[in-house]
Image (cartoon, helix red, strand yellow):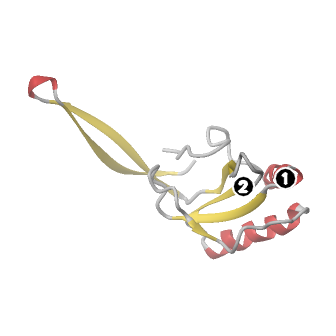
Amino acid sequence: MRITQGTFSFLPDLTPAQVRAQVQYCLDQGWAVSVEHTDDPHPRNTYWEMWGPPMFDLRDAAGVVGEIDGCRNAFPTRYVRVNAFDSTRGWETVRLSFIVQRPPVEDGFRLERTEGPGRSQRYSMQHRQYSAG
């Protein structure tokens, strides 16, 4: 099962040229770009581990792409994502976030509902692993 979190997650994986173009778009908007990684992509895990500090005042995508590659090389079996933060007053939020690497085997989660007495409903989460591809 393919984890679908962030922008572009329903599309095929971005090529290196497409990643570079998206990063350059973020920089052209004046957004600070950061790289994060995790081995726990559960939707409630919103705080991934940062790979270095956010890159403020960067204007060339090559610097960010180098950090992405460094993170990928250090963690070849983890998820890696890029975040673009807009610090403009009134926004002050992540404007774009997308996954740039997935592990060879992705975890999947399935929500199962059980109906009980008096129309009560109980939910449980099932964990599964799926091969990428």
Residue 3 in the image: above or below residue 115? below
Q: Position of residue 113 (x, y in %)?
A: 25, 33
The mark that comes first in sequence, 2 or 1, is 1
| SS at circle 2 | strand
Query: Amino acid type of disc 2?
Result: Phe
The total of numbered circles placed on residues is: 2
Q: Residue at x 62, y 43 (%)?
A: 9
**Please, what secondary structure does the residue beneath circle 1 have?**
helix
Camera-side residue: 24 or 95? 95
Residue 109 location (% of width, % of height): 39, 46
**Along the viewing direction, whichever of 26 and 109 lies nearer the viewer:** 26
Q: Is residue 106 left or right of residue 88?
A: left
Residue 31 x, y percent position in the rendering: 79, 55
Closer to the eye: label 2 or 1: 2
In the displayed orientation, state which residue is furthest to the left: 117
Q: Residue furthest top?
A: 119
Q: CA distance from mark 2 to mark 1?
A: 21 Å
Q: Which mark is residue 109?
A: none
Three-letter residue code for mark 1 = Ala
Q: Report which residue position mark 2 lands on.
A: 85
Q: Residue at x 67, y 71 (%)?
A: 71
User: Residue tagged by mark 1?
Assistant: 17
Question: Splitting the image into 4 quarters, where does residue 111 fall?
Answer: top left
Q: Is residue 100 above or below residue 7?
A: below
Quadrant hosting residue 27: bottom right
Q: Is residue 83 above or below residue 125?
A: below
Q: Residues within 10 Å of mark 2 (few under 14, many from 20)?
A: many
Disc 1 residue crowd, few under 14, some 14–19, many 20+, Cα 10 Å: few
User: For the point 55% across and 43% down, which residue is it?
Assistant: 4
Q: Residue furthest front?
A: 89
